[in-house]
Image: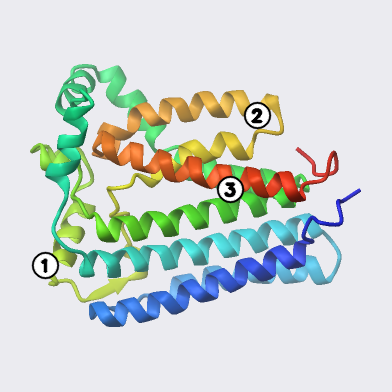
């Protein structure tokens, strides 16, 4: 049985849609201020229409509420992720001086050397391949968690996951706006070790020579704080109700953290910033859960 204080599915979806709508309005405002035009909507519209149709057909017909709600959360994720990508381009265009020197100095003050860690990884083919594979597990973890929670009837977990990720990503973008950086790989002279495409896009945005955002070509351009780190912190938390899932996911994301400095070309300071955002988000979610969660009703 559900605790009366726990919001029902339609309330969660209503809040999520309001968030997506507000985010879209912010994107429109900031892209105009930044002088950016947004194109390439066709693929997004087709994808959203297909997923929305699945959500509507299976929900309204009563054939599968689980599949309907899973598709609904997937649609919200796609829209929010796309909006976030556009927002990062606008904020990068409007951002000020780079803070790479300060971030590298912060690393040094902690006794952390990005170049030393880079040398260790570069000296081992096993480390390069292993950490490279682990680094790209982020998207499979997002998709896998979304599908698992949805198709097993854990709708509250999907809602928690979405709001944690969405809130954390918004904070990440706002911080990156005020503290922009090119990343440790570029700063220390190893730009070829990361995706140069993102670096080229970021440099064009900062120089205001890129004026058109093509949705299918969006790149992840945030360095500080590291959103990879934020999600690596969040993943074990959202699977905390099952020891069978929690420990393997914790181990995987611990290894993911090890891969981030070189895999993403991040300063260690980027990771610390991302971890702080993730921990604060988890603390807020935990406080909310203490007030609203049923004693034994929400599936793990």
Which of the two discs, 2 and 3, sits closer to the camera? 3
Q: How is the image coloured?
A: rainbow
Badge 2 crowding class, 10 Å Cα cut-off, few under 14, some 14 to 19, many 20 or more, is: some
- Residue 16 on image: x %, y %: 62, 66
**Nearer-N-terminus badge (2/3):** 2
Indicate whether 146 appears above or below 127: below
**Nearer-N-terminus badge (3/1):** 1
Indicate whether 231 appears above or below 62: above
Left or right, residue 241 beside residue 196:
right
Which residue is more in the foreground, 257 or 41? 257
At mark 2, the secondary structure is helix
Left or right, residue 39 beside residue 125:
right
- Residue 112 on image: x %, y %: 22, 25
Tell me the residue that label 3 is attached to: 284
Q: CA distance from mark 3 to mark 1?
A: 38 Å
Badge 1 crowding class, 10 Å Cα cut-off, few under 14, some 14 to 19, many 20 or more, is: few
Residue at 63 percent of width and 59 percent of height: 73
Indicate whether 248 appears above or below 68: above
Q: CA distance from mark 2 to mark 1?
A: 45 Å
At mark 3, the secondary structure is helix
- Does residue 47 appear in this view? yes
Tell me the residue that label 2 is attached to: 245
Labelled disc at residue 207? 1
Farthest residue to the left: give it: 189
Badge 3 crowding class, 10 Å Cα cut-off, few under 14, some 14 to 19, many 20 or more, is: few
At mark 1, the secondary structure is helix
Which residue is more in the foreground, 192 or 92? 92
Left or right, residue 249 beside residue 112:
right
- Residue 238 on image: x %, y %: 62, 40
């Amino acid at each position: 049985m559900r605790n009366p204080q726990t919001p029902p599915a339609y309330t969660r979806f209503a809040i999520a849609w309001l968030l997506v709508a507000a985010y879209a309005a912010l994107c429109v405002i900031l892209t105009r201020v930044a002088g950016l035009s947004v194109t390439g909507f066709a693929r997004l519209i087709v994808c959203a229409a297909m997923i929305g149709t699945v959500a509507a057909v299976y929900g309204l017909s009563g054939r599968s509420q689980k599949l309907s709600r899973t598709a609904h959360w997937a649609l919200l994720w796609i829209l929010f992720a796309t909006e976030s990508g556009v927002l990062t381009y606008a904020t990068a265009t409007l951002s000020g001086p780079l803070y790479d020197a300060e971030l590298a100095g912060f690393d040094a003050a902690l006794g952390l050397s990005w170049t030393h860690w880079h040398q260790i990884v570069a000296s081992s083919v096993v480390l390069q391949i292993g950490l490279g594979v682990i680094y790209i597990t982020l998207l499979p973890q997002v998709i896998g968690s979304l599908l698992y929670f949805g198709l097993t009837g854990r709708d509250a977990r999907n809602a928690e996951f979405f709001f944690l990720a969405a809130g954390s990503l918004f904070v990440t973008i706002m911080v990156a706006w005020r503290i922009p950086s090119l990343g440790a790989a570029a700063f220390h002279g190893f730009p070829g070790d990361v995706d140069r495409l993102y670096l080229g896009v970021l440099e064009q945005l900062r120089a205001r020579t890129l004026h058109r955002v093509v949705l299918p070509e969006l790149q992840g351009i945030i360095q500080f704080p590291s959103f990879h780190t934020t999600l690596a912190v969040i993943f074990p938390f959202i699977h905390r109700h099952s020891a069978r899932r929690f420990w393997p996911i914790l181990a995987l994301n611990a290894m993911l953290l090890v891969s981030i400095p070189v895999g993403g070309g991040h300063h260690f300071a980027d990771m610390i910033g991302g971890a702080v955002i993730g921990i604060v988000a988890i603390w807020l979610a935990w406080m909310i859960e203490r007030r609203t969660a049923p004693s034994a009703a929400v599936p793990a």
